Image (cartoon, rainbow, N blue to C red):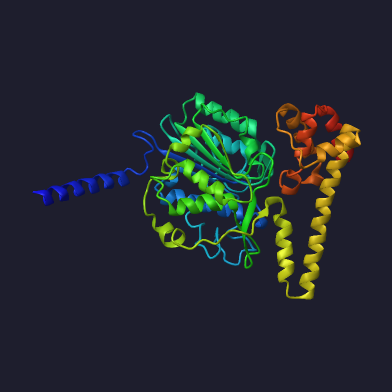
Amino acid sequence: MIVPTLVLSLLSAALSFSDDILNVEQPNKDGNHWAVLVAGSYGWSNYRHQADVCHAYQILKNHGIPDERIIVFMYDDIANNTENPTPGVIINQPNGPNVYVGVPKDYTGRNVKPDLFLNVLQGNADKVVGIGSGKVVKSGPNDHIFVNFVDHGAPGILAFGDDMLKSYQLMQAINTMHKQNKYGKMVFYVEACESGSMFSELLPKDISVYATTASNPDESSYACYYDKKLDTYLGDVYSIKWMQDSDKEDLNTETLEKQFKITKAETNTSHVMEYGDLTIGDMTVAEFQGNQLSPVFLSNNIGTKEKDPCDDGVPSEDVPLAILERKLEAATSQTQREQLEEQLRDLIKSRESVKTIIKKISFFATNNHIQTSRVMDSGVRQALRSWDCYEYVLDHLVATCPQLNLPKNDYALRHLYVFVNMCEERVPAETINEAITKVCGY
């Protein structure tokens, strides 16, 4: 009979669908999902970075990736910060759910540092004994790894609290992992200023690694969702866009390329980029963010809500300034206004000092007003290729010029292009370092 046959066919299809759901953790027959999530900054003005990473954790967890294969780096100084009016709560969008719930505290505080991150990513368990949770990525040739990094950046570097991760260090780790067959496919989502410089002309196309970044090698990434109650920004535009997409899409059918295109189109503050093996873009998002369907957290709290437009974007380096300006605008007493005006003056003065210091270094290094103007021109940013020069100069600058407060000062980070320009114009590294010592030394 036709009807019983049809019923049997539908039942068979339903059972097959159920089997697919039960096998949610398998990128392929023998592989697993792994994820490393990093919020590299600390401090209340950087609230958004930990909020982004906590939200990313909820997406992965609620799409079927277990905690033992999600490793989280975050300072963990936000949820119970004295400035938090709702202790234990972190939100990533206006009136959003508490994304802090259940987040693993694998590596916190001073353990959020680049060498530890690289050891965790490469599965070097012997290098993290007695540190944090001790969890590392124990991946093999069939596994898929998803890495989400959120913090400040500059040409060729990602800020990592009081330290920095350099692009060549990341490339060395990735290439080592590839040679040791420690992954099948690996995907990076990176939120930072000038984050494209971590991969542009560096990430090979033939080692099964795909990366998307919040910005190209030359521009800022942007914060958004200012919260008047919290007096800080809740998220970053690129991160908000990819995560809101993951919240509402069926990740088993959406491809990485589709998510990239949606994120790129909706991030109107910077140029979202992709690098590496672009064929990985044809794979589904589920193969890296988890296959489980209909997560209760997302459907009830995030996915079905009308999204705020995230249209108050501010360049990352201007966030401290924007926060003070908004607080000043909302001040209700003369005393409060005077205190905020003083803080604002001090911040503007410190920013002017950064520009003055870098301009002096440039002039002493080039001994040429025309060349100084050229290397200082923010519209002329040369691609970083002279890594030996740049690294030598950068290390000396951090050690010798505490006035710049690198790498924590995002405004100063945004001026490191000047040193790239000098290196690319073949100004000798020793000459640049002599100028740094002359200007910053005691």
Which percent across, then down, holds residue 63? 41, 49
Q: Quadrant of residue 159?
A: top right
Q: In which quarter of the image is the C terminus?
A: top right
Q: Quadrant of residue 26?
A: top left
Which percent across, then down, holds residue 287? 42, 40
- Which residue occupies 73% across, 72% down? 331
- Which residue occupies 52% across, 45% down? 261
Task: Name the residue at the bottom extreme.
Answer: 333
Viewer-closest of 411 and 100: 411
Q: Is residue 259 visible?
A: yes
- Which residue occupies 61% across, 34% down? 199
Q: Is residue 70 left or right of residue 112?
A: left
- Which residue occupies 46% across, 26% down? 181
Q: Is residue 140 left or right of residue 363?
A: left
Q: In which quarter of the image is residue 87?
A: bottom right
Viewer-closest of 286 and 23: 286
Task: Name the residue at the top extreme.
Answer: 179
Task: Name the residue at the left extreme.
Answer: 1
Q: Can residue 77 be seen in this view?
A: no
Give the total of numbered labels. 0
Which percent across, then down, holds residue 339? 79, 67
